[in-house]
């Protein structure tokens, strides 16, 4: 082969190589672009056979009934104890839905379990590509789950909707969403409290993730996002006909994080949705205002959770807990007025040592579930009810080695999910490797017919 042919060959080879590289680049970009496009799809529908739930050895608890521990089917091992926590129980059309998982240990995918109050049996409806189901919502007669921690790319976040009876739809439509913690329906729109990848301006710091609110006029098919640049939006309050989004209330560590990223003047514990359709900072609604008569209100970070509308206000729980705490600190409040000026927020008159786990509201008033640690190592679990948020009466109480983390009501029956907050479960499992039943109470579901205690 002469020199001119060699040159021609080299040129052709170089051109071919460049074209190949360009095609691979374009293919990769096309795949990445496709992954960032919103997708609405139906999740696999599992058969409706009854789940065979392992029997649970619980102390005699009459008149309570032990229904079983469906969580142990998905998370059977000692190390999975925390993932068996029933983070939420939701009553919906005669069914009891159970939220499981662990977004710290990445325990996904997570099943959607339900208990049928008519069939008196557990079923699995589908499986979500999430690490945890933290909360269920009902809007327009349909059940929704925000995608707490997707197992998929963070280019899009998830919302799940029960499209028809026991048929689930995945709306992978939330732009650049890392976590979606809370939902609210207000003024004909759906609001999602999220952590967004690009929440903060690019010129402040390389870490741009932070709080944002996504707003949808079509139940989650499309969204407009308002970037707030705080930490995360954990919940919404509806008070006096206005909507408020709640971020973390900064303690020393969070204040340092915000200051390092030049976000101190962007963040607030509460943002108010104004008449112009914008969320505005309400720095006056700090921890001392939102958590009155609470020593930790100005000393620690806190988040609002389990908020429920009550009349013209909202009741909610503030969690001040840290991993090193022997016991968590969870306190309940009611906000009746959050307008500029005279704010009306009160601490609910529950026992001072109560660890408040869950709240719901019905026609009878506010129901509160809380636990108190006993000297013998057990828990005293109590349900109180109030028709005016001031005077309370005891509905029921029971002692158990586990505390009741969540509860719900269907007809005249209360349901409870037993939980755990042990952050050192792996160390405990290592020390008791022969005891595979350690912590098996966690995830157990109980029922109580209220007519039997009247």
Image: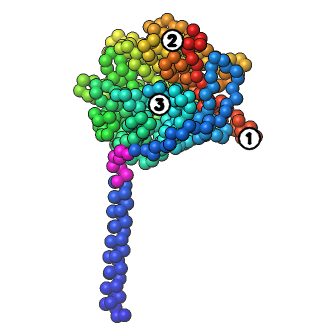
Q: What's the distance in space between the residues labelled 2 and 1, CA to CA? A: 42 Å
For mark 2, does the 10 Å Cα neighbourhood hold few (<14), some (14 to 19), or many (20 or more) residues?
A: many
Q: What's the distance in space between the residues labelled 3 and 1, CA to CA? A: 32 Å
For mark 3, does the 10 Å Cα neighbourhood hold few (<14), some (14 to 19), or many (20 or more) residues?
A: many
- Secondary structure beneath dot 1 equals loop
Q: Which of marks 2 and 1 is nearer the N terminus?
A: 2
Q: Which stretch did the figure color magenta? A: 34-41
> Seen from this angle, which residue lies furthest bottom?
2
- Residue at point 28% right, 27% down? 188
Q: Is residue 222 visible?
A: yes
> Seen from this angle, which residue lies furthest left?
276
The residue pinned by badge 3 equals 135
Is residue 428 rendered to the left or right of residue 191? Answer: right
The quadrant in which residue 336 appears is top left
Quarter of the picture containing the N terminus is bottom left
Up/down of 240 relative to 248, above or below: above
Quarter of the picture containing the C terminus is top right
Up/down of 282 relative to 440, above or below: above
Q: Can residue 324 be seen in this view?
A: no
Q: Position of residue 56 (x, y in %)?
A: 67, 31
Q: Nearer the viewer, residue 206 or 214?
A: 214
Q: What's the distance in space between the residues labelled 2 and 3, CA to CA? A: 22 Å
The residue pinned by badge 1 equals 433
Is residue 271 rendered to the left or right of residue 258? Answer: left
Q: Where is residue 119 in the image (x, y as percent from the top left)?
A: 53, 29
> Seen from this angle, which residue lies furthest front?
119
**Nearer mark to the viewer, of 2 and 1:** 2
The residue pinned by badge 2 equals 385
Q: Position of residue 132 (x, y in %)?
A: 51, 37
Question: Does 263 lie within the magenta span?
Answer: no
Q: Position of residue 320 (x, y in %)?
A: 53, 24
Q: Which of 440 and 312 is in front in this view?
A: 440
């Amino acid at each position: 082969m002469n020199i001119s042919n060699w040159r021609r060959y080299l040129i052709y080879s170089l051109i071919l190589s460049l074209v190949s590289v360009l095609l691979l680049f374009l293919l990769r970009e096309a795949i990445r672009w496709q992954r960032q496009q919103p997708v609405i799809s139906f999740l696999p529908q599992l058969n409706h056979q009854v789940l065979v739930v392992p029997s649970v050895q619980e102390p005699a608890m009459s008149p309570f009934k032990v229904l079983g521990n469906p969580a142990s089917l998905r998370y059977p091992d000692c190390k999975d104890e925390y993932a068996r926590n029933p983070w939420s129980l939701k009553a919906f059309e005669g069914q009891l839905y159970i939220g499981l998982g662990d977004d710290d240990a990445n325990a996904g995918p997570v099943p959607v379990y339900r208990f049928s109050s008519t069939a008196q049996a557990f079923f699995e409806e589908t499986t979500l590509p999430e690490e945890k189901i933290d909360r269920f919502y009902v809007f327009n007669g349909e059940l929704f789950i925000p995608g707490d921690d997707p197992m998929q790319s963070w280019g899009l976040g998830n919302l799940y909707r029960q499209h028809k009876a026991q048929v689930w739809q995945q709306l992978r439509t939330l732009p650049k969403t890392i976590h979606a913690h809370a939902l609210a329906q207000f003024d004909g729109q759906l609001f999602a409290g999220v952590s967004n990848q690009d929440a903060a301006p690019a010129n402040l710091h390389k870490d741009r993730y932070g709080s944002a609110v996504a707003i949808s006029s079509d139940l989650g098919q499309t969204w407009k996002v308002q970037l707030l640049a705080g930490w995360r939006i954990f919940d919404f309050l509806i008070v006096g006909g206005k909507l408020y989004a709640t971020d973390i209330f900064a303690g020393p560590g969070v204040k340092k994080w915000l200051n390092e990223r030049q976000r101190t003047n962007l963040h607030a514990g509460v943002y108010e949705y104004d008449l112009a359709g914008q969320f505005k900072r309400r720095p006056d609604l700090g921890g001392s205002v939102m958590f009155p008569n609470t020593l930790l209100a100005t000393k620690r970070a806190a988040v609002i959770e389990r908020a429920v509308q009550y009349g013209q206000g909202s009741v909610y729980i503030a969690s001040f807990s840290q991993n090193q705490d022997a016991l968590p600190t969870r306190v309940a409040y009611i906000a009746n007025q959050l307008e500029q000026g005279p704010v009306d927020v009160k601490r609910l008159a529950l026992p001072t040592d109560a660890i408040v786990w869950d709240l719901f509201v019905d026609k009878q008033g506010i129901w509160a579930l809380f636990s108190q640690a006993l000297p013998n190592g057990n828990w005293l679990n109590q349900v109180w009810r109030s028709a005016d948020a001031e005077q309370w009466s005891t509905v029921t109480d029971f002692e158990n080695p586990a505390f009741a983390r969540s509860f719900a009501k269907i007809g005249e029956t209360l349901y409870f999910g037993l939980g755990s907050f042990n952050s050192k479960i792996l160390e405990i499992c290592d020390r008791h490797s022969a005891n595979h039943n350690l912590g098996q109470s966690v995830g157990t579901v109980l029922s109580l017919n209220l007519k039997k205690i009247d």
